[in-house]
Amino acid sequence: MTGRVADGVAAPAAVARPAWYALDRGGWRDYVTLLHPPYTAWHLSYVVMGGCLAPVVAWDRLAVVVVAFALAVGVGAHALDELTGRPLRTRIPGGVLVTLAALSIAGACAIGIAGAVLFEAWLVLLIPVGLFLVLAYNLELVGGLFHSDVWFALAWGGFPVLNGYAAVAGDIGPVAVLAAAFAVLLSLAQRALSTHVRYVRRKVVAVRGELSLADGTTVPVDGERLTSAADAGLRLLSLASVTLAATLVAFRL
């Protein structure tokens, strides 16, 4: 695939897909892409990690909070994100995105309220915090003030860990705070890689240039070369996070 022609030379275009996991556009494939499957699994793994660090693991409560986050983050947050600028270039109608977001976020809030009523009343305080994070980050409220690397790490890294622990243990202990710090740092690493990849995939339309190596040879630069290392790192980090969560589950069973 080539981009514009300058001085008679076709410039290699940047990679065409908006994300390495994005399917071809249209139909049911758009809805799969909307879920950001590897990233959703990654952030749900934080919930599992938090829950498995509780002194006694209540698997029913852990399962319920995972479902709540799957709705809020996997569906709701991603639907709002796609509504704001169409970063994944799906053809899902705006009305459908709004409906998906509203129903999934409302469902997550309802689960949270039920959990607070049945287990620990103070857990209800986490609901408005989560609701604010989903809306402020994904709708880029206040001129995008909350749509930053730090807010991403807090919302999609630290907050899920704390919720997973709190929903199972009924409080937030020092170990949960340390685990949340780990998730924040790992999420910052994710953001550092993904920001570069998103820029190339979604904004760059053509790439020109070459690398001159020490042995005198040259290697052409194209979109794939600019994104492949970061994409590989993101794949491995997502798999590592899910594997760590599975390890903790196996350890606590």
Image (tube, rainbow, N blue to C red):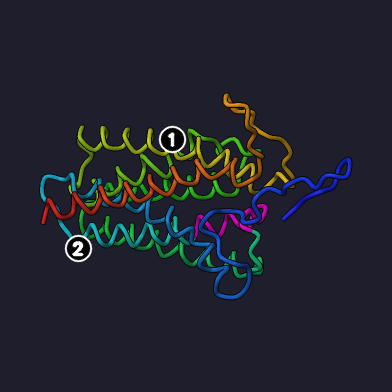
Above or below for 109 versus 188:
below
Q: Position of residue 4 (x, y in %)?
A: 82, 48
Q: Count neighbours of disc 1 (C-alpha within 10 A) and say few if under 14, some if 14 to 19, many if 20 or more.
A: some
Magenta region, residue range:
76-88
Q: Within the image, what quadrant is residue 83 found in?
A: bottom right
User: Which residue appears at 50% of the width and 46% of the height?
Assistant: 231
Residue kind at label 2, given as amino acid type:
Asp
Q: State the residue lying farthest toward the top.
A: 214
The residue carrying mark 1 is 189
- Circle nearer the viewer, 2 or 1: 1
Q: Which mark is residue 146?
A: none
Residue 138 as seen in the image, left or right of residue 221: left
Above or below for 205 versus 114:
above
Q: Nearer the viewer, residue 172 or 10?
A: 10
Q: Where is residue 120 in the image (x, y as percent from the top left)?
A: 22, 51
Above or below for 118 versus 218:
below
What type of secondary structure mainly makes up the magenta span?
A: helix
The residue carrying mark 2 is 60
Quadrant for the C terminus in the image: bottom left
Q: Where is residue 171 in the image (x, y as percent from the top left)?
A: 21, 42
Q: Does the magenta stretch include residue 84?
A: yes
